[in-house]
Image: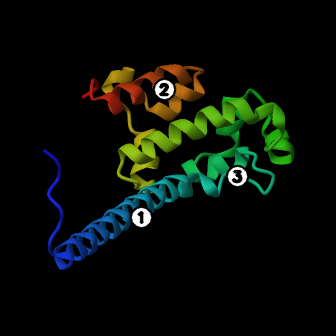
């Protein structure tokens, strides 16, 4: 019992053409999916693009501007004097804390459907889950990780 020989080569050629078209469609779909993924990633990254200097470091004043915070607010978060932030806001000393804040901003931005105004408003809004304190104020009180946990819960669907 073997495979019967193909009597009509026209059918075989048609099958190859159909297979080739399917392969092209599959490739096009993959290209479209990749392009869509890249587009979403670029949109996500775009919000923080203005907060990064040409060396790839986060700028404290730039993140403050992104969030519509005052320099004194970001200075308080970093535990520095406002004058230090004005002069050395992108210093490597600040990068770990700025990266954590940038990550939080990015996540809230995504939770607000990539809406910067809504992101800024969220940081200002008193929340019952934070005992009626705004996320901004909670962060400035030194409770960054409490806000981070809240956002993680929001992402996972546990917070309401």
42 left or right, relative to 56: left
Q: What x and y, as percent, mark residue 87?
A: 86, 46
- How far separated are the C-alphas under marks 3 and 2? 21 Å
Considering depth in this image, is 39 or 61 the residue closer to the camera?
39
Determine which of the numbered discs, if any, sits on residue 31 in the image. 1
Q: Nearer the viewer, mark 2 or mark 1?
A: 1
123 left or right, relative to 19: right
Residue at 33% from the left image edge and 65% from the top image edge:
23
38 left or right, relative to 10: right
Residue at 82% from the left image edge and 36% from the top image edge:
92
Mark 3 and 2 residues: CB-CB less than 8 Å, in contact?
A: no
**Against 81, is 130 above or below?**
above
Q: Nearer the viewer, mark 1 or mark 3?
A: 1
Element assignment for label 1 = helix
Considering depth in this image, is 78 or 107 the residue closer to the camera?
107
Residue at 25% from the left image edge and 76% from the top image edge:
13
User: Which residue is denoted by mark 3 in the rendering?
Assistant: 52
User: Which residue is denoted by mark 2 in the rendering?
Assistant: 148
Mark 1 and 3 residues: CB-CB less than 8 Å, in contact?
A: no
Q: What x and y, as percent, mark residue 39?
A: 46, 61
- How far separated are the C-alphas under marks 2 and 1? 35 Å
Q: Quadrant of residue 128?
A: top left
- How far separated are the C-alphas under marks 1 and 3? 30 Å
Element assignment for label 2 = helix
């Amino acid at each position: 019992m073997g495979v019967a020989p193909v009597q009509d080569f026209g059918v075989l050629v048609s099958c190859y053409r159909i297979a080739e078209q399917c392969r092209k469609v599959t490739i096009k779909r993959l290209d479209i999916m990749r392009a869509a993924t890249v587009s979403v990633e670029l949109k996500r990254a775009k919000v923080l693009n203005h907060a990064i200097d040409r060396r790839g470091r986060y700028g404290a004043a730039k993140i403050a501007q992104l969030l519509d915070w005052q320099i004194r607010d970001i200075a308080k978060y970093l535990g520095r004097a406002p004058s230090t932030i004005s002069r050395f806001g992108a210093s490597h000393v600040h990068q770990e804390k700025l990266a954590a804040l940038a990550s939080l901003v990015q996540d809230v931005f995504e939770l607000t459907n990539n809406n910067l105004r809504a992101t800024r408003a969220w940081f200002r809004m008193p929340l019952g889950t934070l005992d009626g304190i705004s996320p901004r104020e909670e962060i400035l009180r030194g409770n960054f990780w409490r806000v981070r946990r809240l956002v993680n819960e929001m992402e996972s669907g546990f917070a309401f």
